[in-house]
Image: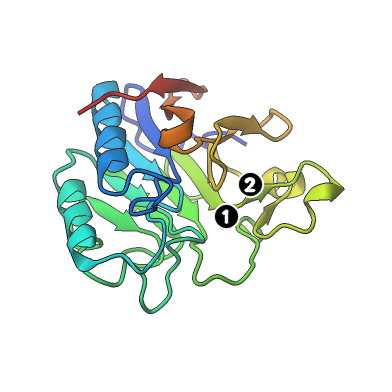
Amino acid sequence: MGANGNGRGLGRDLLLAHSSDLHLGGTAHHPEMDALDIVLATAAAAGVDALLLAGDIFDHNRLPLALIDRAARTLADAAMPVIILPGNHDCLTPSSVYRRGGLADPANVHVLGITADESLALPALDLEVWGRPHLDHVNMSPLTDPRPRGAARWNVATAHGHWVTGPHDHHRSWLIHQEELDMLDVDYVALGHWDRALKVGSGELPAYYSGSPDLAKTVNIVRFSPSGGVSVERMPLVQP
């Protein structure tokens, strides 16, 4: 596990903001763009190099075009790359929010399954991100058969699903198991689907849920050091 050292490296820390489950347009969450504005403001205040959104950015795929277009403009104005993994709420059905409007158009926005396949390379950051987007509402395993480690200095896996803590979880959908984490050759695992922020797994590989910003009140800031270390802190939300 860990960095393979073959990348160019930035010569400084690489900072990645990780959030998920904004549920834009949902009745139980901020109905408009508040959550997105706040996450972007927090990422900018932290001085990150990129933002990774691990699923359920939108509450459902039936949102009006006006809201989708507003989100596209907000993302386009972000002064950083934004990587999006579609989740079970905003999955890549033919009527997906990512297939309507201009969400995938901005040059800085990368939607796994739309603008990239399951793997995205960002050479300027010496970073590769792998993740399996939800294609529909059918159950699937987000971390089975992972992609081999890429050539970049830093490799991140992202998944939107339910961490299995015991047999009582087996009836749930989109399960993530410890043995699947053990198969990953990455430096960080960015998880979505849970509203609370939590580190999971055996501890050998940094694997974290960010929690929803609405409930966790934080964003994960992941620091990749040139020496090979990875650290994670929860940064309180910053109002735009």
Q: Quadrant of the C terminus?
A: top left
Q: What type is the residue that disc 1 sits on?
A: Pro
Which of the pair 164/66 is nearer the observer? 66
Residue shown at the point (24%, 28%) measured from the top left? 44
Which label lies toward us, 2 or 1?
2
> In 3D space, how far apart are the residues under numbered discs 2 and 1 (Cα atoms)?
8 Å
Under circle 1, the secondary element is loop
Q: Find disc 2 in the rendering and name its residue.
A: 184
Residue 108 point in image, percent of width and height: 21, 50
Which of the pair 53/16 is nearer the observer? 53
Residue 81 in sight from this viewpoint? yes
- Name the quadrant containing residue 1: top right
Q: Find disc 1 in the rendering and name its residue.
A: 148
Residue 205 point in image, percent of width and height: 64, 33
Q: How is the image coloured?
A: rainbow
Residue shown at the point (69%, 28%) measured from the top left? 203
